[in-house]
Image (tube, rainbow, N blue to C red):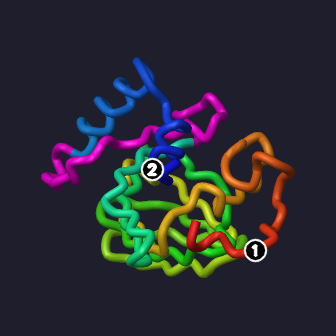
Amino acid sequence: MEELDKAKALALQGKAKTDALRRFHDAIRPWGLALPPVEPLVLDFGLGNFEKVGLIEYWIANELEAGYCGKYLFVFDGQTCPMHKHHVKKETFFIVKGRVRMLLDGQSQEMGPGDVLPVPPNHSHSFTGIGPALLLELSKPCFIADNVFEDPRIQIGTNTSSGWPMPKEPLNGR
Protein backbone atom coordinates (compact mmCIF):
# COMPACT_ATOMS: atom_id res chain seq x y z
CA MET A 1 0.00 0.00 0.00
CA GLU A 2 1.29 3.47 -0.88
CA GLU A 3 2.24 5.66 2.09
CA LEU A 4 -0.43 8.27 1.24
CA ASP A 5 -3.08 5.53 1.09
CA LYS A 6 -1.99 4.35 4.56
CA ALA A 7 -2.32 7.92 5.84
CA LYS A 8 -5.77 8.31 4.24
CA ALA A 9 -6.93 5.17 6.02
CA LEU A 10 -6.14 6.90 9.33
CA ALA A 11 -7.92 10.18 8.48
CA LEU A 12 -11.31 11.39 9.65
CA GLN A 13 -14.15 11.09 7.16
CA GLY A 14 -17.71 12.31 6.73
CA LYS A 15 -19.16 15.21 8.72
CA ALA A 16 -16.14 15.48 11.05
CA LYS A 17 -13.83 15.96 8.06
CA THR A 18 -16.20 18.35 6.29
CA ASP A 19 -16.64 20.51 9.41
CA ALA A 20 -12.88 20.63 10.10
CA LEU A 21 -12.08 21.61 6.51
CA ARG A 22 -14.74 24.34 6.51
CA ARG A 23 -13.21 25.81 9.67
CA PHE A 24 -9.72 25.44 8.19
CA HIS A 25 -10.66 27.31 5.00
CA ASP A 26 -12.36 30.03 7.06
CA ALA A 27 -9.17 30.43 9.13
CA ILE A 28 -6.73 30.62 6.20
CA ARG A 29 -8.87 32.62 3.75
CA PRO A 30 -7.54 35.97 5.08
CA TRP A 31 -3.98 34.73 4.53
CA GLY A 32 -4.50 34.56 0.75
CA LEU A 33 -2.44 31.39 0.35
CA ALA A 34 -2.60 28.90 -2.49
CA LEU A 35 -2.95 25.27 -1.46
CA PRO A 36 -1.79 22.26 -3.44
CA PRO A 37 -4.48 20.43 -5.44
CA VAL A 38 -4.47 17.33 -3.21
CA GLU A 39 -6.99 15.85 -0.80
CA PRO A 40 -6.13 17.02 2.73
CA LEU A 41 -5.86 14.58 5.62
CA VAL A 42 -7.82 15.48 8.75
CA LEU A 43 -6.17 13.54 11.57
CA ASP A 44 -7.17 12.96 15.19
CA PHE A 45 -4.60 10.18 15.71
CA GLY A 46 -7.40 7.79 16.67
CA LEU A 47 -8.05 9.62 19.96
CA GLY A 48 -11.47 10.97 19.00
CA ASN A 49 -10.70 14.51 20.16
CA PHE A 50 -9.71 16.43 17.02
CA GLU A 51 -10.17 19.82 18.72
CA LYS A 52 -7.41 19.02 21.22
CA VAL A 53 -5.13 16.52 19.44
CA GLY A 54 -4.98 16.58 15.67
CA LEU A 55 -3.97 18.46 12.57
CA ILE A 56 -4.70 18.87 8.88
CA GLU A 57 -2.02 17.71 6.42
CA TYR A 58 -1.61 18.54 2.75
CA TRP A 59 0.91 16.14 1.21
CA ILE A 60 2.60 18.22 -1.49
CA ALA A 61 5.13 15.52 -2.39
CA ASN A 62 6.40 12.24 -0.95
CA GLU A 63 9.06 11.24 -3.45
CA LEU A 64 10.45 7.93 -2.18
CA GLU A 65 13.01 7.40 -4.94
CA ALA A 66 14.17 11.03 -4.98
CA GLY A 67 14.40 11.06 -1.19
CA TYR A 68 12.24 14.02 -0.16
CA CYS A 69 8.82 14.96 1.21
CA GLY A 70 6.95 18.25 1.57
CA LYS A 71 3.74 18.82 3.52
CA TYR A 72 1.67 21.70 4.81
CA LEU A 73 0.63 21.09 8.42
CA PHE A 74 -2.17 23.13 9.99
CA VAL A 75 -3.24 23.31 13.63
CA PHE A 76 -6.07 25.30 15.15
CA ASP A 77 -5.63 27.41 18.28
CA GLY A 78 -4.76 25.07 21.17
CA GLN A 79 -4.64 22.00 18.93
CA THR A 80 -1.57 19.76 19.31
CA CYS A 81 0.28 17.41 17.02
CA PRO A 82 1.21 14.80 19.67
CA MET A 83 4.71 13.98 20.90
CA HIS A 84 6.44 11.61 18.52
CA LYS A 85 9.73 10.82 16.83
CA HIS A 86 11.01 9.12 13.70
CA HIS A 87 13.86 6.63 13.57
CA VAL A 88 14.80 7.47 9.98
CA LYS A 89 13.16 10.72 8.92
CA LYS A 90 14.84 14.07 9.45
CA GLU A 91 12.38 16.97 9.29
CA THR A 92 12.74 20.71 8.97
CA PHE A 93 9.75 22.84 9.97
CA PHE A 94 9.20 26.32 8.52
CA ILE A 95 6.45 28.45 10.08
CA VAL A 96 4.44 29.97 7.22
CA LYS A 97 1.67 31.73 9.19
CA GLY A 98 0.62 31.99 12.81
CA ARG A 99 2.48 30.91 15.92
CA VAL A 100 3.22 27.54 17.50
CA ARG A 101 4.64 26.26 20.75
CA MET A 102 7.23 23.71 19.59
CA LEU A 103 8.54 21.06 21.97
CA LEU A 104 11.80 19.36 21.01
CA ASP A 105 13.41 16.93 23.44
CA GLY A 106 11.62 18.55 26.38
CA GLN A 107 12.64 22.10 25.41
CA SER A 108 9.83 24.51 24.57
CA GLN A 109 10.05 27.46 22.21
CA GLU A 110 7.52 29.77 20.62
CA MET A 111 7.92 30.09 16.88
CA GLY A 112 6.39 32.45 14.32
CA PRO A 113 6.44 33.22 10.59
CA GLY A 114 9.85 32.67 9.05
CA ASP A 115 11.21 30.58 11.92
CA VAL A 116 12.92 27.30 11.02
CA LEU A 117 13.48 24.24 13.20
CA PRO A 118 15.40 21.15 12.01
CA VAL A 119 14.51 17.93 13.85
CA PRO A 120 17.01 15.06 13.51
CA PRO A 121 15.90 11.41 13.68
CA ASN A 122 15.13 9.99 17.14
CA HIS A 123 14.35 13.40 18.66
CA SER A 124 10.90 13.69 20.27
CA HIS A 125 8.83 16.64 19.11
CA SER A 126 5.31 18.08 19.08
CA PHE A 127 3.71 21.44 18.39
CA THR A 128 0.61 23.32 19.49
CA GLY A 129 -1.14 26.20 17.75
CA ILE A 130 -1.08 29.60 19.43
CA GLY A 131 -3.98 30.72 17.29
CA PRO A 132 -4.29 29.02 13.90
CA ALA A 133 -0.91 28.13 12.40
CA LEU A 134 0.44 26.75 9.13
CA LEU A 135 3.80 24.98 8.95
CA LEU A 136 5.74 23.65 6.00
CA GLU A 137 7.49 20.35 6.66
CA LEU A 138 10.45 19.46 4.46
CA SER A 139 11.88 16.03 5.17
CA LYS A 140 13.08 12.68 4.06
CA PRO A 141 10.20 10.62 2.64
CA CYS A 142 7.33 9.82 4.95
CA PHE A 143 6.87 6.17 5.92
CA ILE A 144 3.90 5.56 8.21
CA ALA A 145 5.82 2.79 10.02
CA ASP A 146 8.54 5.33 10.98
CA ASN A 147 6.14 7.25 13.25
CA VAL A 148 6.67 6.47 16.94
CA PHE A 149 4.16 8.17 19.26
CA GLU A 150 4.72 8.64 22.97
CA ASP A 151 1.02 8.02 23.72
CA PRO A 152 0.46 4.24 23.41
CA ARG A 153 -3.23 4.86 22.57
CA ILE A 154 -2.13 6.21 19.19
CA GLN A 155 -2.08 3.08 17.06
CA ILE A 156 -0.03 4.42 14.15
CA GLY A 157 3.41 3.34 12.99
CA THR A 158 5.44 1.28 15.41
CA ASN A 159 2.84 1.88 18.16
CA THR A 160 0.64 -0.75 16.55
CA SER A 161 2.79 -3.46 18.11
CA SER A 162 4.24 -2.38 21.48
CA GLY A 163 4.71 1.26 22.43
CA TRP A 164 8.13 2.88 21.70
CA PRO A 165 10.14 0.00 20.12
CA MET A 166 13.12 0.52 17.86
CA PRO A 167 12.68 -1.09 14.44
CA LYS A 168 15.03 -3.99 13.76
CA GLU A 169 16.24 -2.39 10.51
CA PRO A 170 16.02 0.97 8.75
CA LEU A 171 12.70 1.67 7.10
CA ASN A 172 14.03 3.44 4.01
CA GLY A 173 13.51 1.70 0.72
CA ARG A 174 10.08 0.29 1.59
Element type at marker 1? loop
Q: Position of residue 151 (x, y in %)?
A: 76, 49
**Contact (Cβ within 8 Å) of mark 2 with mark 1:** no
Q: Which residue is mark 2?
A: 4
Name which residue type carries label 2: Leu
How packed mark 1 is, by other alpha carbons closer than 10 Å (few <14, some 14-19, many 20 or more), is: few
Q: Residue at x 65, y 68 (%)?
A: 86
Location of residue 130 in the rendering, given as x and y in whole percent from the top left corner = 45, 53
In this rendered view, identify the residue nearer to me: 24 or 92.
92
Tell me, for residue 169, which label it has, or none: 1
Residue at 24% of width from left, 46% of height from top? 28
Q: How many marks?
A: 2
Q: Which mark is residue 29?
A: none
Residue 68 drawn in magenta:
no
The answer, for residue 134, to whether it is visible in the render is no
Query: Is residue 73 at all visible to an observer of this figure?
Result: yes
- In the image shown, does 127 or 112 lie closer to the viewer? 127
Q: Which of 6/80 is in front? A: 6
Q: Quadrant of the C terminus?
A: bottom right
**With 46 as the anchor, is 112 left or right in this view?**
left
Identify whether 40 is placed above or below 137.
above
Is 50 contained in the magenta span? Answer: yes
Tell me which residue sits at (18%, 43%) in the image.
Answer: 29
Q: In the displayed image of the protein, which residue is found farthest to the top? A: 15
Residue pictured at 86% horizontal, 51% vertical: 162
Q: Amino acid at mark 1?
A: Glu
Q: Which residues are magenta?
A: 29-53
Disc 2 on helix, strand or loop?
helix
